[in-house]
Image: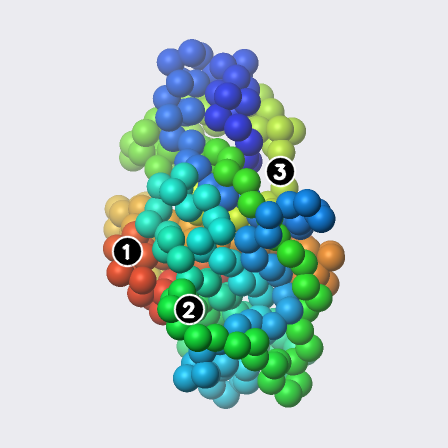
Amino acid sequence: MTHGSRDALRSLALQHLPPEVAEAWADLLRPGIRLQAAANSDDVVGQLGGLPALPPASAWPVWDGHGPLCFVASIECARLPWAALDIDLPAAGTLLFFYFDGQLDDGDALVLAEDPESWAGARVLHVAADEKAAERGTPAGLKPYPVVPLTAQVEMTATEPWHPSLRDAFAPGAPLGNRYDHPVCSQEFLDALWEFGDEVGHQIGGHAHSVQNPVEIEIAEAVLGGQASWDDPRLSAEAGNWVLLAQFDSEDAAGMMWGDAGALYWLIRPEDLAERRFERAMFTWQCS
């Protein structure tokens, strides 16, 4: 929902919430790595766009029946302040993100979490540090996005009060994904959070900045095959099994526009992240 320093977010909460509630809310903040366009003197940790460096044996990701995916971003794990996160991000190697962006079919085929047949339209690869990799040209029919070097900064991230983790802390049993009767759902506090900062941005780890309802709920619905209603405890439990790996916002400098100024999200189960099973990551996207 928003991001900033722990002190700034805690101070904001204390201005609008009872002290004990403010402290409990601040305890639920999570560290994330915010990524933004690098200036000349900034340390570069990766890039949007350009071309990926792939091992010779690695094929360019393809969605069968539709075509190759576009290359979105590369992140050099060793250059990140990964130790500051509360997820088990690799300490080395490169994360590569690919997505079927509609260049080949004028946006006819959509990659949707609720459609398992489309899941091959988004991929994340981890190239180990000891693997030899070389820049790979874009497949025919695709135009690479302009390169935007990225720099990183650790910030605390807050999420919506109706996110499962906050709901469980403040109103266990309240309807999933909805406001409930509690100070953290007051319009005054919500307005203050949005005024503090409502940019989605690019991010590794932390709470996702969802454009609509929490992305964890979307993923949980998809994993359960759309068979669980929002009042089904299975949906809440499944949503709690997923953490944000990365989000990439629309970015003018890279010529990236995801829907109507939307964002791309990759989520993963912590156990799969620990085992480096990035093929098990799930994808969704949201726009306003």
CA–CA distance in space, label 2 to label 1 = 15 Å
* Distance between the alpha carbons at the discs numbered 3 and 2: 33 Å
Label 2 Cα neighbours within 10 Å, binned few <14 / some 14-19 / many ≥20: some
> Does residue 278 appear to the left or right of 95 in the view shown?
left
Per the rendering, the mark at residue 198 is 3
Question: Pointer 1: what residue?
Answer: 274
Nearer the observer, 53 or 250: 53
**Sequence-earlier tag: 2 or 1:** 2
Secondary element at image label 1: helix
Give the mark nearer the N terminus: 3 vs 1: 3
Question: Does residue 169 appear in this view?
Answer: yes
Distance CA(mark 3)–CA(mark 1): 31 Å
The percent position of residue 273, horizontal first and vertical second, equals: 32, 57
The residue singled out by tag 2 in the image is 127
Q: Nearest the camera: 129 or 230? A: 129
Structural crowding at the residue carrying mark 1, measured as other residues with C-alpha within 10 Å and reported as few (<14), some (14–19) or many (≥20): few
- The first of marks 3 and 2 along the sequence is 2
Q: Between label 3 and label 1, give the one nearer the viewer.
A: 1
Q: What's under tag 1, amino acid-wise?
A: Ala
Residue in the picture at 37% in, 22% down = 24
- Amino acid of disc 3: Asp
Helix, strand, or loop for circle 2? strand
Q: Residue at x 56, y 76 (%)?
A: 135
Asked whether the beta carbons under mark 3 and mark 2 sit within 8 Å of each other, the answer is: no
The residue carrying pointer 3 sits among few (fewer than 14), some (14 to 19) or many (20 or more) residues within 10 Å by Cα, namely few
User: Which image quadrant for residue 55?
Assistant: bottom left
Three-letter amino acid code of the residue under disc 2:
Val
Residue 220 is at least partly visible in this image: no
Q: Is residue 43 above or below residue 22?
A: below
Question: Looking at the image, which residue is at 42% across and 68% down?
Answer: 127
Residue 50 lies, in percent from the top left, at: 64, 69
> Which residue is at a point 50% across and 21% down the rendered structure image?
7
